[in-house]
Amino acid sequence: MKQNEAEEELDLRGVICPYNFVKTKLKLEDMNPGTVLAVLLDDGDPIRNVPQSVQNEGHTVLHQESVEQAFRVYIQKKSG
């Protein structure tokens, strides 16, 4: 799989902390281990907090890129 491909995408632009992390966590729980989720996040607290929070949960942040006034973060669900 290429670095910029994801099985699913979640658009959380306009969603405030901590709801964007909660929604990301719930989505990851529904996905198979090792699959990749792309999450669109606003600048500011969301892009600072959500990647760190998912890493604290054991998932891997593969890559993030700037998209218009937001960021797309690629998260690989932890195995097992």
Image: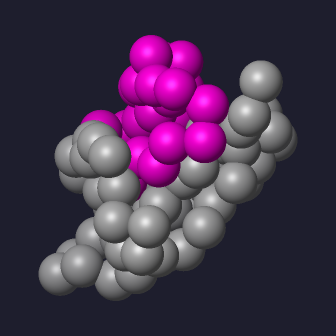
Task: Look at 80% across and 39% down and name the residue there.
Answer: 58
In the displayed structure, 48 sits above or below 22; it is: below
Q: Residue at x 58, y 49 (%)?
A: 76
> Is 45 left, or right, of 16 in this rendering?
right
Asked whether, in this view, residue 32 is left or right of residue 13, the answer is right
Report if residue 32 is visible in the image. Answer: yes
Residue pushed farthest front? 1
**Viewport quadrant of the N terminus:** bottom left
* Total number of numbered discs in the rendering: 0
Residue 20 falls inside the magenta stretch: yes
Can see residue 18? no
Segment tinted magenta in the rendering: 15-38
Quadrant of the drawing holding the C terminus: top right
Residue 17 x %, y %: 48, 37
Residues 34 and 10: in front is 34
- Judging from the image, the colouring scheme is one colour
Residue 25 lies, with reference to residue 44, above or below; the image says above
Which residue: 34% across, 83% down? 66
Q: Residue furthest left?
A: 68
Closer-to-camera residue (79/23): 79
Q: Residue drawn at (28%, 70%), measured in percent from left and top?
A: 70
Q: Is residue 21 above or below residue 2?
A: above
Where in the figure is residue 5, as x and y percent of width and height?
34, 65
Residue 79 on the magenta span: no
Query: Residue 75 at what x, y percent from top left?
Result: 54, 53
Q: Is residue 9 left or right of residue 44?
A: left
Residue 8: x percent and y percent? 29, 42
Left or right of 40, for residue 48: right
Vertical order, 18 against 46 (above or below): above
